[in-house]
Image (cartoon, rainbow, N blue to C red):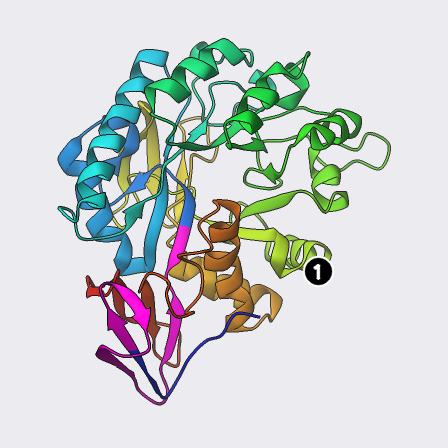
Amino acid sequence: MIKVLTDTTIYIKDGKIADHGEPLVIEKGCYAVPGFIDEHTHGGYGIDVMDTDYEGLRNLTNKLPGEGVTAFLPTTMTASLKKIREAIDNTLKVKNHNDNNEVVGAEIIGLHLEGPFINKKYKGAQAENYILTPDSEIMKELIKHSHNNIKKVTYAPELDNKFEFIKCLTNNNIIPSVGHSDGTFSQIEIAVEKGLSSVTHFHNGQSPHHHREPGVVTAGFVFDELGVEIICDGIHLHKDTIKAVYKIKGREKIILITDSMEAKGLKDGEYKLGGQKVIKLGNEARLEDTTLAGSCLTMIDAVKNIIKFTGCTLEDAVTMASTNPARNLNILHRKGSLDKGKDCDIVILDNKYNIVKTLCKGKVVF
């Protein structure tokens, strides 16, 4: 079980949690938790991953620690392959500077490609004219273009007729995640046998649970092999639906995400998501046809909400926001807990779970 520390001292050496070194005092009434990892975000604070703006994405790495995020996957949208390649290039440029400590902030672990290999029926806020049938040759080219930095791909398994696409993903250690999919229970069951391991924004943009026609949602509940992303804002999912997901899947199989877009942290108004016009009103972001278009959720609010909606502990919530994504992304050996030897990615919370301080690799960045 993950540990949340209070009234103690953590030692930092060379950016790692250590036995001895620079002291970080955790006062009584405050909590030290491992930094959150957002494996599904399109941006925020005026920044859109698809803008392919170096300074913008670099600024995003500086902004995210303010909500407790110390590592993340910039997430692309369905767009032209040229535009996706440009987004990959920009992400790698910032990532390389980040890895060389030229950027101090949340670490870019790699990329999450949400589309373009999805089902038009459940396109949601994705651009329909750029949707493609799952194609392993195109995917191989994108993997090569990314220098093997694609970590997760959201796609529609029911369109992968010969399972060449999922084979391409698993052979390259990429997480196959079902999303924007009209898959039947049987189709998802076969995909699970082939290596499907994740459900993108569970319940949203996928065939629902129906008592005679079970779909992606039913499969997400049934198969232990499937971890599920949830957008815990009380908008994408009703709080009682979140309670049901928590009760059935349990804390080990839930990954808290934001699925946030550029309007997060900004005033109400007109913004964009992957080139499409989006209207932000309060905590909601929608296309002109009222389709939900990403979120304005922060990770710290996702943590607070899951506690409020389900009655789970802070330890449980942090497991879903940090440990589970670290395990999912195969970086649990260096992130996702406060064990000695791991990166000193730490969030200090007060007794109301507000962020007091965030450290990325031992440096105070918020």
| Main secondary-structure element of the magenta-colored stretch | strand
- Residue 14: image x %, image y %? 22, 64
Q: Is residue 325 above or below residue 87?
A: below
Callout 1 crowding tier (Cα within 10 Å): few <14, some 14–19, many ≥20: few
Q: In the image, what residue occupies the spot 62% across and 57% down? A: 252
- Horizontal arrangement in the rendering, residue 231 relative to residue 238 (left or right): left
Query: What residue is disc 1 on?
Result: 247
Locate residue 19: give its quadrant.
Answer: bottom left
Residue at position x 53%, y 23% in the image:
123
Residue at point 37%, 47% (across, down): 296
Picture coordinates of residue 194, whole percent (x, y): 69, 27
Highlighted magenta segment, given as a residue range: 11-37
Please state the horizontal and vertical placement of residue 229, each as a whole percent of the image: 55, 45
- Tag 1, which secondary structure? helix
Q: Is residue 81 left or right of residue 119?
A: left
Q: Looking at this view, is 238 or 131 the one in front?
A: 131
What is the tally of numbered marks visible in this picture?
1
The location of residue 311, given as percent across then percent down, is 60, 71
Residue 117 lies in the magenta stretch: no
Q: Quadrant of the N terminus?
A: bottom right
Q: Is residue 34 magenta?
A: yes
User: Which residue does the image show at 58% across and 37% down from the upper left?
Assistant: 204
Q: Quadrant of the C terminus?
A: bottom left
Instruction: Residue type at mark 1: give it.
Output: Lys
Rendered view: 260 above or below 114? below
Which residue is nearer to you in this view: 242 or 284? 242
- Specify whether 40 is left or right of 83: right
